[in-house]
């Protein structure tokens, strides 16, 4: 019996909660496949997420792009130049010492720094915009480097349209 | 079959004065099937994994994942040879790993406090005692460096546990109990995970998912 059949059977008996997006059904259990990620299409957002990665990390209080961060940015630039249909929202975040306003500024500087690197590597500036979120959207909350290091980041997000935070938006 | 191979290789075997050679050649051919050319990486190169030869279960993939561990945590399921990088919304990016063989396994919490590109390899004293023929030091980027292109060093309360997440020269060992306690990954995967885990990342090594995480 194939995996699909097993899943269908489990779902049919109501043994486990199921989601089904676009005809894809998978039980809500660890290791079950995720809709959209089973046969990843070249140029898809899923490919970008699994094979390239969206996050770039920063040191405490810094918006300087490190050598390590540049490795991710180079990979992103390569992919983005090959897949020109995507617009790119570069989202900055912070979890650093200082006021919330200061962190908002820092997160914006981080986003701008990554965008500048992508431009340097040949990604069209008209496709991109940057926004700083400050402390609004942490990955994880705790008073330890374990959380802070995850939160001091820029996320390169693929978009189909500009949103109101983009200068290109009208 | 045996006869025809002997006939075919007879000349070479006679010249070498041994029949061991065809076996080595066969072993090499079997190993070579796991590779597919070379990949340049930050000044060095590694042998690219031939993923067609690897069971899809060990390929990097997004899966559903239900656990109390917060996003950004690395969780290792030793028995099942999986490493999860935990995401939001009950999902995780899952990688296949090789883990410690019997007697060399360990479980507990740790933190990535050090990371290195193309790390040099210095076998610890206990390992040298078991295998006195090992080199005392292998430079980073050397073709025989077992750590491969990246290493992430596991610490607890500021002390180096001696365990690492690193690459491998033996892609066939992923999915098996093979190491002296380190977590080994395909070179492509350790490069990928390295970029996703900043210094400070929490790591939890479990006997299996659902096992007591307070141990250690």
Image (spheres, rainbow, N blue to C red):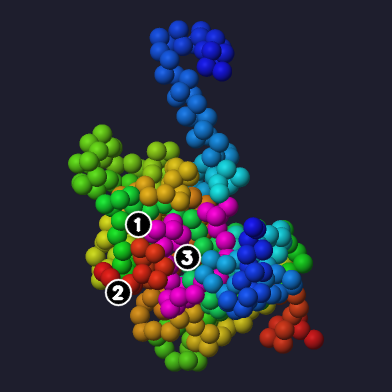
Q: Is residue A154 left or right of residue B128?
A: right
C-alpha span from label 2 to label 3: 18 Å
Residue in the picture at 71% in, 60% down? A41
Total marks placed: 3
Q: Are marks 1 and 2 on the same chain?
A: yes
Quadrant of image for the N terminus of chain A: bottom right
Marks 2 and 3 close (CB-CB < 8 Å): no
Q: Which of disc 3 and disc 2 is earlier in sequence?
A: 3
Does B68 appear in magenta? yes
Does A117 appear in magenta? no
SS at mark 2? loop
C-alpha span from label 1 to label 3: 16 Å
Q: Are marks 1 and 3 on the same chain?
A: yes
In this view, B52 is above or below B29: below
Q: Which residue is mark 2?
A: B214
Q: Which residue is mark 3?
A: B84
Quadrant of image for the C terminus of chain A: bottom right
Q: Which of disc 3 and disc 1 is earlier in sequence?
A: 3
In this view, B213 is above or below B98: below
Mark 3 nearby-residue class (10 Å; few <14, some 14–19, many ≥20): many
Q: Is residue B49 left or right of residue A11?
A: left
Residue B164: mark in rendering: 1
Residue B202: mark in rendering: none
Q: Which residues are magenta?
A: B56-83
In this view, A131 is above or below B156: below
Q: Whole-percent x and y of residue B25? A: 49, 24
Specify the subunit that label 3 lies on.
Answer: B
Specify the subunit that label 1 lies on.
Answer: B
Q: Is residue A120 visible?
A: no
């Amino acid at each position: 019996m194939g995996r699909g059949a097993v899943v269908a059977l489990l779902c049919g008996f109501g043994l486990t909660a199921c989601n089904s997006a676009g005809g894809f059904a998978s039980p809500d259990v660890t290791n079950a496949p995720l809709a959209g990620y089973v046969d990843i299409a070249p140029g898809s957002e899923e490919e970008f997420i699994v094979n390239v990665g969206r996050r770039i990390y920063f040191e405490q209080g810094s918006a300087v792009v490190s050598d390590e961060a540049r490795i991710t940015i180079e990979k992103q630039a390569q992919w983005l130049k090959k897949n020109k249909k995507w617009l790119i929202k570069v989202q900055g975040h912070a979890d650093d010492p200082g006021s919330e306003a200061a962190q908002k500024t820092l997160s914006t500087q981080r986003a701008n720094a990554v965008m500048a690197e992508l431009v340097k590597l040949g990604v069209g500036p008209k496709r991109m915009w940057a926004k700083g979120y400050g402390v609004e959207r942490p990955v994880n909350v705790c008073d330890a480097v374990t959380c802070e290091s995850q939160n001091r980041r820029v996320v390169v997000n693929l978009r189909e349209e500009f949103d109101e935070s983009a200068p290109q938006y009208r | 079959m045996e006869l025809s191979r002997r006939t075919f290789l007879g000349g070479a075997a006679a010249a070498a004065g041994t029949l061991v050679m065809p076996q080595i050649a066969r072993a090499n051919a079997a190993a070579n099937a796991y590779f597919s050319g070379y990949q340049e990486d930050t000044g060095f190169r590694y042998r690219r994994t031939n993923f067609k030869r690897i069971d899809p279960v060990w390929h990097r993939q997004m899966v559903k994942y239900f656990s109390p561990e917060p996003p950004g945590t690395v969780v290792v399921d030793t028995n099942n040879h999986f490493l999860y990088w935990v995401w939001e919304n009950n999902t995780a990016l899952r990688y296949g790993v090789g883990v410690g063989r019997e007697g060399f396994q360990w479980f507990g919490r740790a933190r990535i406090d050090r990371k290195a590109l193309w790390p040099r390899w210095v076998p610890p004293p206990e390992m040298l005692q078991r295998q006195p023929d090992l080199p005392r030091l292998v430079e980073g980027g050397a073709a025989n460096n077992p750590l491969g292109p990246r290493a992430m060093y596991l610490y607890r309360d500021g002390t180096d546990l001696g365990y690492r997440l690193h690459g491998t020269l033996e892609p066939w060992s992923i999915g098996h109990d093979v190491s002296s306690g380190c977590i080994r990954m395909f070179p492509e995967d350790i490069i990928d995970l390295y970029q996703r885990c900043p210094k400070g990342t929490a790591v939890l090594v479990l006997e299996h998912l659902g096992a007591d995480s307070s141990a250690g």
